[in-house]
């Protein structure tokens, strides 16, 4: 995989000399997550000096949030570097020594939501019984076999049957159930347990996909998501270290925290600028540093929630898909083109939350790496839709954080979809009590104490995030990702200044959506569009120097 980053070869190349001779373009980056920071870093490295980052919250990092807990770092957001070979996040971490203390167990090639590849997952039923290991392995092999089938529809162009409704969940449930029920060598009790495990596996899959249900994930597009070869890595000192590496060479004045944006005006004219600023001289006096550029001929203007206004030649928008779904109608003026609106509406994003529970002593055995919740009464259900008071049924598992020398005795629970939003509305005491009762019920141990501490994420209710990461929902495709990523105005439809509004973020990367490396690469991609445009412009007016 090639990096999108472009670097100037010398101070005398056409781009560098052109940027010195001409007015520096004003570039505003909205959002200081991985995409925004990567875009900003790339622009600054290539000679663009008039760059401003507007971050709505009081911190940088976006959906990366590391919390220090004693000697340990807990990740409320991104946790794993997914793959190594050619992954720019991996190479950034490796080159800067962030993986020196990553244990062999934390280099997992298996399920990405386990903190250690060693040990055994304990599948426990709601009757307090552990499902035998050999039965778990039998079912796991079957499930993985069917999972591979779901990849073939996109990768091999295999037609999707109408009975699946183009849904990963429906297809997987139907095929696995048929294989289980038609197995002549299995007992009825084993079949029931396997059917119950199927529902639990689909809950885990939903958490990993950040979808409300795998029924909503497109079967025809599922195989386009591309896995980078190599292990999944945990950064012991925290994923925020990657954020800080990206930000360390960005001058402090560039990033402005606590600056939520109300509206982005694009395809702007001088007349429109005068209309908006008419009668607002008092406001302008409060922001003298913008007097020279408001109103002006810049094609884009930003209104911040605090009333400040900024002009820009280019705006790189890195807002999450969740924010775009909620606010695109009011965020952009004029409104977005219909195909981009359709892409925002069709693509999916949901919430995957973590619930960390800390105990004084472990109640789990040393070889246990996770406790998986299998509800036997869900074996025959078609859709797992719960009333609000049963939100806790969507908690699929608690993983053991490893090693204990670093984390102490800590579990990390997983919940997604609407039930995650319901969990976010509860107070800590309620969630801690509910999780304790679940652990007692499924392990059959009524003496499990309440945790000494609880910490949990709340990505769904965060107004500046509104979800964890994107997925291709039934009815959407990679083409919608491309539409979302296409800059405005469309080049073939107007003679207006180009690349006024650019779009970055994990949801805009067709192959690596939902990942940190997808976010980082998308930021570099949009910076590269601007770099290449100005290179072409200055090349056209400059004679190539003799070497």
Image (cartoon, helix red, strand yellow):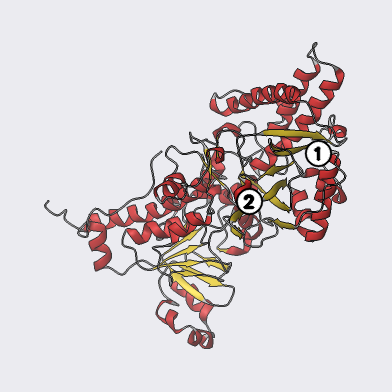
- Decide which of 212, 539 is in the foreground and name it: 212
Q: Which residue is found at the position 57% from the left and 29% from the top?
A: 154
Left or right relative to 493: residue 446: right
Left or right relative to 84: residue 546: left
Left or right relative to 354: residue 535: left
Question: How crowded is the residue under tag 2: few (<14 C-alpha within 10 Å), some, or many (20+)?
Answer: some
Find residue 407 and name its label: 2
Which of the 4 quarters of the picture holds residue 112? top right
Instruction: Give the spatial CA distance, label 2 vs label 1.
Output: 33 Å
Expressed as whole percent of the image width and height from the top left, the position of residue 284 reads 49, 84
Question: How crowded is the residue under tag 1: few (<14 C-alpha within 10 Å), some, or many (20+)?
Answer: some
- Decide which of 357, 21 is in the foreground and name it: 357
Viewer-nearest of discs 2 and 1: 2
Q: Which residue is found at the position 84% from the left and 24% from the top?
A: 192
**Relative vertical location of residue 114 with respect to residue 533 in this rendering, above or below:** above
**Relative vertical location of residue 453 with respect to residue 132 in this rendering, above or below:** below
Left or right relative to 147: residue 546: left
Q: Which secondary structure, mark 2?
A: helix
Expressed as whole percent of the image width and height from the top left, the position of residue 508 reads 52, 48
Residue at mark 1: 384
Q: Would residue 56 be visible to someone looking at this image? A: yes
Disc nearer the start of the sequence (2/1):
1
Q: Which residue is found at the position 52% from the left and 58% from the top?
A: 33
**Relative vertical location of residue 158 with respect to residue 325 in this rendering, above or below:** above
Expressed as whole percent of the image width and height from the top left, the position of residue 102 reads 51, 45
Expressed as whole percent of the image width and height from the top left, the position of residue 107 reads 53, 38
- Decide which of 191, 522 is in the foreground and name it: 191
**Quadrant location of the N terminus?**
top left
Q: Which residue is found at the position 81% from the left and 44% from the top?
A: 439
Which of the 4 quarters of the picture holds residue 71? bottom right
């Amino acid at each position: 995989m090639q990096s999108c980053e472009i670097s100037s070869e010398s101070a005398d190349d056409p781009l560098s000399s052109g940027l010195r001779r001409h007015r520096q373009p004003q570039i505003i980056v909205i959002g200081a997550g991985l995409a925004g920071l990567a875009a900003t870093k790339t622009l600054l490295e290539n000679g663009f000096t008039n760059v401003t980052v507007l971050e709505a919250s009081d911190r940088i990092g976006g959906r990366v949030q590391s919390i220090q807990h004693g000697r340990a770092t807990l990740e409320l957001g991104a946790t794993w570097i997914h793959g190594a070979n050619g992954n720019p996040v991996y190479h950034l971490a490796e080159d800067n020594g962030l993986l020196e203390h990553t244990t062999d167990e934390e280099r997992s090639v298996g399920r990405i939501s386990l903190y250690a590849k060693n040990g055994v997952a304990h599948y426990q039923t709601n009757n307090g019984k552990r499902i035998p290991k050999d039965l778990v392995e039998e079912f796991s092999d079957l499930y993985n076999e069917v999972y591979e089938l779901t990849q073939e529809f996109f990768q091999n162009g295999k037609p999707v049957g109408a009975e699946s409704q183009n849904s990963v969940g429906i297809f997987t449930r139907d095929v696995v159930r048929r294989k289980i029920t038609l197995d002549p060598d299995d007992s009825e009790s084993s079949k029931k347990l396997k059917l119950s495990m199927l529902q639990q596996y689909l809950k885990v899959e939903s958490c990993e996909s950040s979808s409300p249900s795998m029924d909503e994930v497109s079967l025809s597009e599922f195989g386009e998501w591309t896995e980078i070869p190599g292990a999944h890595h945990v950064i012991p000192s925290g994923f925020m270290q990657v954020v800080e590496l990206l930000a360390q060479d960005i001058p402090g004045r560039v990033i402005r925290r606590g600056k939520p944006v109300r509206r982005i005006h694009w395809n702007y004219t001088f007349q429109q600028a005068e209309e908006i600023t008419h009668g607002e001289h008092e406001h302008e006096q409060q922001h003298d540093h913008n007097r020279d550029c408001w109103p002006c001929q810049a094609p884009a203007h930003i209104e911040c929630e605090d009333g400040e206004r900024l002009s820009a030649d280019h705006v790189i928008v890195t807002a999450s898909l969740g924010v775009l779904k909620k606010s695109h109608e009011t965020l952009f003026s004029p409104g977005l083109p219909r195909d981009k609106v359709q892409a925002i509406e069709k693509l999916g994003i949901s919430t995957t939350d973590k619930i960390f529970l800390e105990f004084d002593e472990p109640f789990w055995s040393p070889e246990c790496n996770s406790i998986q919740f299998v509800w036997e009464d869900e074996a025959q259900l078609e859709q797992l839709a719960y009333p609000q008071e049963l939100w806790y049924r969507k908690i699929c598992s608690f993983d053991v954080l490893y090693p204990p020398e670093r984390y102490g005795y800590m579990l990390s629970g997983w919940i997604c979809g609407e039930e995650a939003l319901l969990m976010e509305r509860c107070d800590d005491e309620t969630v801690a009590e509910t999780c304790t009762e679940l652990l007692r019920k499924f392990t059959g141990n009524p003496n499990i104490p309440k945790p000494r501490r609880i910490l949990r994420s709340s990505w769904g209710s965060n107004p500046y995030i509104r979800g964890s990461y994107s997925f291709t929902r039934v009815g959407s495709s990679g083409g919608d990702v491309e539409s979302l990523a296409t800059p405005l105005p469309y080049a073939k439809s107007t003679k207006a200044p180009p690349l006024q509004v650019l779009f970055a973020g994990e949801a805009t990367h067709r192959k690596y959506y939902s990942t940190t490396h997808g976010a980082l690469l998308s930021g570099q991609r949009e910076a590269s569009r601007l770099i290449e445009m100005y290179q072409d412009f200055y090349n056209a007016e400059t004679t190539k120097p003799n070497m």
